[in-house]
Image (cartoon, grey):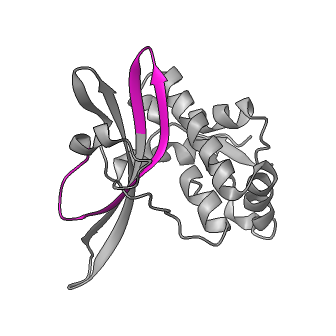
Amino acid sequence: MFKIFKLFFVSFSLMGISNFIPVAASNSDFPKELLPCLPQGKTIKSVSLDAQIKHNGVSYYQLAIKEEIDGIFEDKTEHLDSNTVIQLDRLGCLIRIPHGWDSLNFSKRKFLPEAIANQLALDFTKRNIALAGGREKYEQVPWELEVSDAGDGPWVFFPEDVWAYQQLNLKLPEHYVVVNSWDELNSSSEK
């Protein structure tokens, strides 16, 4: 079995914080120009800004969305965490990665040019390092927690996340695979 590794979950849950730290859309740091672009619906519970870049005069925003959906049991609800990437330019908003389950199952490179996916991953990783309290804290916790869990298989990364780690000279776990989608897990080769 593969260790499920989503970069946006690891640093938060390992610090003893829930796997989603909402920065409410009403927060003063949240770009107000994005408000009309946000997904609407009564099931959306919170939205936070995970990454932000500018490329050739166009802004890209990676948002984490927490949604409440009907559960498989009557009268129960479940939480769905997903991402969306919104492109914003002088013409308005364009949803580049729609929110929902598929946003977590594929590399951003499926939806975006490689350079943009890479830069979003880089900004996201930098933000998580800051939230963790610095590089040392960010690096030490994830891989050390798994030392006793050797039977679960390798860590799973998307290519843009490995690229971001390499740019920041962050250490990767000893055993990992790089996939473009979670469907590739059975055919991936371990590093």
Quarter of the image where the C terminus is located: top right
- Residue placed most toward the observer, 1 or 157: 157
- Residue 33: quadrant of the picture: top left
The answer to whether residue 125 is seen in the rendering is yes
Quarter of the image where the N terminus is located: bottom right
Q: Residue at x 26, y 45 (%)?
A: 35
* Residue 52 lies in the magenta stretch: yes
Left or right, residue 7 beside residue 15? left
Residue 47 picture location, percent across and down? 36, 55
- Residue 80: quadrant of the picture: bottom left
Left or right, residue 119 beside residue 131? left
* Residue 180 lies in the magenta stretch: no
Q: Residue at x 52, y 21 (%)?
A: 115
Q: Residue at x 55, y 53 (%)?
A: 8
* Range covered by the magenta-colored residues: 38-61
Question: 159 above or below 70?
Answer: above
Magenta region, main secondary structure? strand
